[in-house]
Amino acid sequence: MDKRFESIKEEALSKINNAKSVKALNEVRNEYFAKSGLIATLMSKIRELAPNERKDYGQAVNTLKVFLEEKLGAALREAQSNELSEKLESEKIDLTLPGRNLETAPQHPFHLVKDEICDIFIGMGYIIAEGDEVEEDLFNFTLLNMPENHPARDMQDTFYINEKLLLRTHTSPVQARVMQKNKNQPLKMISPGKVFRRDDDDNTHSHQFGQVEGLVIGEGISFSHLKATLDLFAKKMFGPKREIRLRSSYFPFTEPSVEVDVSCHVCNGKGCSTCKGTGWIEILGAGMVNPNVLTMNGYDTEKFTGFAFGVGIERVAMLRYGIDDIRRFYQNDIRFLKEFPKR
Ligand code: DAH
């Protein structure tokens, strides 16, 4: 290198070596290579020289320029790569660390049992129909063969929104709604949901509880279909050894009506505290759909017959899990809820 630029080169090299960051190196680069930087200043001096000196001078400046460009380029690449490594290192995520535990809730026994009941009937080919919790008086009572002033209405007092609207007292109104949609076509449906009664809460009563309604309509549907269906349900729900027993009962929307007991799964029918010594536990109400209900909701009773049933969800859950107080379903006590399996 030309002696003239030896000191410039040394100074530049030491500046490059001392600049440890990309930012500092860019400052050095500006000092030498900006429009009015040192290299440009040296180049412009060429005009002041005698013509025979210009070539040598120009070549010498150019050599310096190329040399510094290379040194700066290499230093910049190294600084960039170092800074990137540092950044990656500081932002490193340790994928082997155990994750923070999000506690998942167990299934609420109400939903656990509701889903289980539904699964059993879905397995028998039933479809699920949903109804509204706020229902018309017409569907909750009248279309189920309980006209105004029918004494059976007294058994199911509820919360009224106005003269015509109420919180449904059972899931049976879904029967009327689904029948009206499917007039004179075979039907096989269940309807799970919440129902309400103006009851004082105690260990077996709650002003809010759950039911699953069932309805089957077709040609030639008979009482034996009802019995076989409920027998299968009892065995799937409470175990293969369970028997059912039908007791004559009364519901305005079925005729004949029955109350269905299942042999006690705790004592196997011998008698214990769960079954109050009788060997049997009542689980649901059922019957053959009253022809009045079929007619009112659009079915030809010459052709169609049907059966229906309604099962209380908490009641089944209480029997299944030995729960002694229906209020536990609604108190949100974590210790109680933790007893049930997770999803
Ligand atoms: N709806 C009745 C109740 O809440 C239960 C019931 C009984 C439903 C007989 C039915 C049935 O479908 O056939 O007390």
Image (cartoon, rainbow, N blue to C red):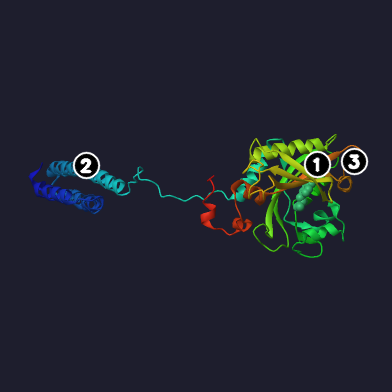
Amino acid carrying mark 3 in the image: Thr
* Residue that carries the numbered disc 2 in the rendered image: 74
Q: Determine crowd level at label 1: few under 14, some 14-19, many 20+ residues with C-alpha closer than 10 A.
A: many
The quarter of the picture where the C terminus appears is: top right
Distance, label 3 to label 1, CA atoms, is 13 Å
Q: Amino acid at mark 1?
A: Phe
Residue in view at x 20 percent, y 41 percent: 70
Residue 177 percent coordinates (x, y): 80, 49
Q: Is residue 268 visible?
A: yes
Residue situated in front as seen by the camera: 47 or 15: 15
Marks 3 and 1, the one that precedes in the sequence: 3
Residue under label 3, please give it.
301
Residue 174 visible? The answer is no
Outermost residue toward the right in this view: 302
Q: Secondary structure at mark 2?
A: helix
Spatial separation of the CA atoms under disc 3 and disc 2: 96 Å
Front in this rendered view, residue 325 or 274: 274
Q: Is residue 234 left or right of residue 60?
A: right
Which amino acid, mark 2?
Answer: Ala
Where's residue 48, x and y in %? 15, 51
Residue 101 relative to residue 89: left or right = right
Q: Is mark 2 within 8 Å of ligand 1?
A: no
Residue carrying label 1: 307
